[in-house]
Image (cartoon, coloured by chain):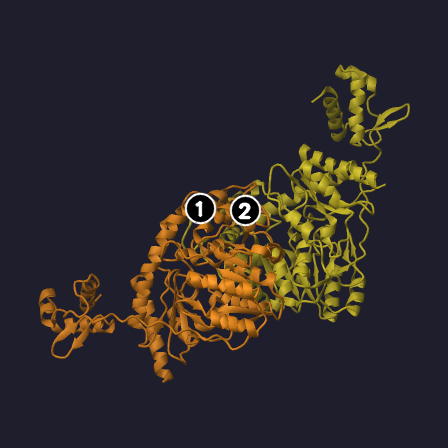
Chain colours: A orange, B yellow
Amino acid sequence: MTLYENLAEAIETRIRQGLYRPGDRLPSVRSLGIEHGVSLSTVQQAYRVLEDKRLAVPRAKSGYYVPETRQVPELPQATRGTQRPVDVSQWEQVLDLMSEEPSEHLTQFGRGRPDIDSPTLKPLTRALSRFGRQQSLSGLTYGSIQGNLQLREQIARLMLDSGCQTPASELIITNGCHEALSTAIRALCVPGDVVAVDSPAFHGVMQALKGFGLKALELPTDPIEGISLEALEMALEQWPIKVLQLTPSCNNPLGYSMPDHKKRALLALAQRYDLAIIEDDVYGDLAYRYPRPRTIKSFDEDGRVLLCSSFSKSIAPGLRTGWIAPGRYYDQVLHMKYMGSGPTATLPQLAMSAFIEGGHFDPHLRRMRHLYQRSRDQMIEWVGRYFPENAKASRPEGSFMLWVELEEGFDSLRLNKLLRPKGIQIAPGSIFSAAGKYRNCLRMSYAARPTPQIEAAVREVGEVAKTLLTSHD
Amino acid sequence: MTLYENLAEAIETRIRQGLYRPGDRLPSVRSLGIEHGVSLSTVQQAYRVLEDKRLAVPRAKSGYYVPETRQVPELPQATRGTQRPVDVSQWEQVLDLMSEEPSEHLTQFGRGRPDIDSPTLKPLTRALSRFGRQQSLSGLTYGSIQGNLQLREQIARLMLDSGCQTPASELIITNGCHEALSTAIRALCVPGDVVAVDSPAFHGVMQALKGFGLKALELPTDPIEGISLEALEMALEQWPIKVLQLTPSCNNPLGYSMPDHKKRALLALAQRYDLAIIEDDVYGDLAYRYPRPRTIKSFDEDGRVLLCSSFSKSIAPGLRTGWIAPGRYYDQVLHMKYMGSGPTATLPQLAMSAFIEGGHFDPHLRRMRHLYQRSRDQMIEWVGRYFPENAKASRPEGSFMLWVELEEGFDSLRLNKLLRPKGIQIAPGSIFSAAGKYRNCLRMSYAARPTPQIEAAVREVGEVAKTLLTSHD
C-alpha cells in the first residue's frame, strides 16, 4: 500500500467507527499532514480516494466533510406482470449461470450459494464423515421412496416453527427444493396448463414450466408485500389458472415476506377458485426476525398447499436434501417423485437427521441469520456507494439475495459478459421472468462475508455498470 | 438341532462334497443307524428331510439314491409383447416394493440392491468420510449442472471398456440411472407419444411412461437374445414409435445380453426409421464374462443412442450417482436435468471420483462379478430344488437378478402377500409390464451371499408357491 492509501484507510476506519459522523468536518489537509508526517499532496490524494468512495465531500474554501446522509438506494418499483400467459424463454442465460463450477478465481454473486464456512456446521461434516465410514445398512444402500423416516420426523418438528403441524408421514424427501418444486408442478399440471407466478420468480421454476410445456402468467408483485391479490383475482376470472406458484417468505429474488393477513387472504381466494398453491419456503428459515414468518401452508385447512423446501439455503446446497409436504396431492406427488429419480441419496439424509437431532440446527440458523443481516446492510451500502446514481435496491427481510434495479434500457446480460474476464458473475434479471423482463435488473448474493475483496468486486460491478450507462446514453 | 437334523446335515455335506455323486446309492438306513448310534426311525426322518430337499430319492426295495441329475429349471419362454401401445398400470404394486426401508427383519428378494458389504468398498467409504469432513469448496456446495468434471473424466475412461469413446464433455451426472432414464424420456417425448420397450422391462421406466402420459408398446423378447427385431420392424411400420427404450446388456429382469451382431442390426434399423434409442446399461459392468458386452452406444455413429447408467448396481445405490451420454440430444437432456432436480449431490461425486482414480473400481467389479456368478448358480439350484415342478428360471449373464416363471394363472401378488408376514419380499412379475402381464412370474435378487438363512427363505418362497398352486387347482 502506498502512503496515501494507508492514510485513506486510517480516515475511513475513523468514519466507520463513528469518530466522524455524517455532516462532521474532517481534519484539514494541513493538520493531517503534520499528524501523519506526510506531504500535503499525499493527504490530498488520500482525500481523493475517500471522495471516490463517497466517504468525503469537499466544500469550497472549507475543507472536507462526511456526507450529510449516506445514500441509501431507493426501493425498486412494484412489477407489472404479464398481460397474458406466456411461454418461458431464457434457458441459455440460466445455463450460463449453472454451468459454473465453484472456483477461487470467480466472485460468484450470481448463484444462491449460502455461506458454508461457519463453524456451526462442524457437527454436520462430522456426521457425514461418520456415516460415510459405515457400509452396511447405511449411506450406501437405497432408502424408501418416501425418504428416511427419522429425517422426516426431524423436519416435521422444525416445521412447527413456521406454524405447520404436518406429520412425518405426510412428507416426502426430494433432491433439494428444486426437485420438490418440479415434482409438484408435474404432479398437478398437463402441458398447456397455465401457472400463475410471482414476478420476478425463481428461474428453476420458470424453466420447469418451459420444460413441461406450461405457460406462465406473471403477477404484479410489490417489493414489500408480494403479489397483488387484486391482480390474481382478475387473472383467475380471465384465465384457466391451474396452480399458483410463489415464494411468500424471504422471497427470491425480491426479499420481501408477505404479511400474514395477506397470506390468509390469498388462501381464501384460492379456496374460492379451487386453486392449488405451490409454496416455495426454501429461504423462510433465514428470516432475520424471530419468530420466522408463518407459511401459507400453516393456514391451510383443506390440503391445497404443497409446501416445498430444503436445507440447500439454510445449511448446505451440495447435500441436495429437500422435502415436500404435498397435502391432498400426496399420492400423485409420490408417484411423480418415484418416476423422476427414484429414492433420494441416503448419506446426506442420515447426516442431516443426526445434525438436527443433536440440536445443531437452531444455533447454526441463529448465527447465519445474524451474519446475513449484517451483510445485507453492508451490501446495500456498497450498492449505494458504488452503483450508478439511480440504482434501486430491495430490502431483504431474510436470506442473502439483493435485487438491484437500474434504469430502463440497462442491459444486465452485457454487464455479465463484461464482468466475466474480471472473474465476477452476477445473475441477470431476465432469468427471473418468463417473458424475459427485468433485463435492467440483477440479483446479487451477499452470502459471502464482506471482505475488502468482495467490496472491490461490488465496486467493479458498479463501475462497469456506469460505463454501460454512459455508452447507452 | 435334533438328532435327525444333525444326521441329515451330515449326509448333505457329503453329497455336496461329492462323496456321493448323482446316481450313487446312499448308505442304508441300517448302516447309518449303526455308524451314528441312532435309531432307525431317526435315520428315516433324516432321509425324509433330504427327500424334501431333493437331495435323496427313494427307490422301491433298494434304499436311497442321489438324484440322477440335479434338476435345472428350464428357461422361460420368449415373451409375446402387446398387440398395441397401452397405458401403463401397476403403480400400487411398485409403490409397495419401494416403500420398504432396509431392515434386518426382511429378506428382500424384491429390490435391486447390490451387495455393499464387500471389503473392496472400503476405499469408497474412506473417501466419503474424508470428503464429508471437509467444508469449503467440497461436498457441501453446489456443483455445476453437468456434474463434477473429474468424475465425468473417470466415467469416460471406464466407458472405454464397453467400446464407447465418449468424452467427459458429453456426459451429464444424474441422480442415479433412474433420473437418467426419466430425463431422457422426458427430453424426447411429449404426452401421447409411443415408446417401444423390451418386455419384461424395468418398472422405473414403465412408471415414467405412465407419469408423462406416454404409451408403451411391449416387444416380444427372447430370454437369451433379447427383443425381436422382426417384431420391432413390424411395429415401426404400424405405429408412430418415437423412442425405443431397452436394457440390452445383462438385462433387468431377464438377465440376457443381446449379441453384438444383433445390437448392430438394431442400430441399422433405428437409422432406417430415424428412431432414438435409450439404452439402459446399469448392469452392463456386472457381466460375468470379460470383456464385458459392448453397448449399442459403442456402435452409434450419428448420436441417436442415449446411454443411461449409474454406480447403483456396480458400487452402491444409496450414492444416487448416475450419468447419461445423450449424444445429439445433449442440449434438451441438460435442460431437462436442470428442470427436474438441479445439480446432483456433490459429496458422492467427489468420493466416487477418488475411488475410481485410486484404481479401486476394477478390483471391486472383478470380485462382485465372481461372487454374483456363484450366487446365480446357487440360486438356480435352489429354485430347481424348492420351487414347484414346472418352475422356469432365467440364465443371467450378469448382475444379480433371477426371473422365475411359474405356470399360467399363478399369482405372484398373492405370493408376495403371503410371504410378507414371514418377513420375505419378492418382486411380482406384473410390475415389469405396462399391461400387467407376467403375474405368474417373479424376480428375485441373489445379491446377498448365499447363507442357510437365504436358502431357508428361498425354500419358503417355493413352499408358499406350491400351496398357491394347489389351492389354484
| Nearer to us in this view, B352 or A287 | A287
Residue A22 is at least partly visible in this image: yes
Q: Which residue does the numbered mark 1 point to in the structure image?
A: A356
Report which quarter residue A32 is drawn in. Answer: bottom left
Disc 2 on helix, strand or loop? loop
> Does label 2 or label 1 sit earlier along the sequence?
2
Residue position for label 2 = A148
Q: Residues within 10 Å of mark 2 (few under 14, many from 20)?
A: many
Residue B51: name its quadrant.
top right
Which chain letter goes with mark 2?
A
Q: Is residue A431 among the parts visible in the rendering?
A: no
Check the picture and name the quadrant holding the C terminus of chain A.
Answer: bottom left
Location of the N terminus of chain A (image quadrant): bottom left
Considering depth in this image, is A434 or A261 the residue closer to the camera? A261
Q: How many marks?
A: 2
Mark 2 is on which residue type? Asn
Circles 2, 1 touching at the beta carbon (< 8 Å): no
| Residue B204 to residue A459: above or below | above
> Quick one: which residue is furthest to the right in this view?
B61
Task: Name above or below for residue B276 compared with residue A155.
Answer: below
Q: Is A194 above or below relative to B208?
A: below
Residue A89 in the image: x percent, y percent? 53, 73
Label 1: which secondary element: helix
Image spot of residue B181 (x, y percent)? 63, 59
The chain holding disc 1 is A
Taking the image as shown, residue A99 lies to the left or right of residue B274, namely left
x, y percentage for residue B453? 67, 33
Q: From the viewer's perspective, tell me whether residue B114 is left or right of residue A473.
A: right
Residue B323's tag is none
Q: Position of residue B367 (x, y in %)?
A: 62, 43
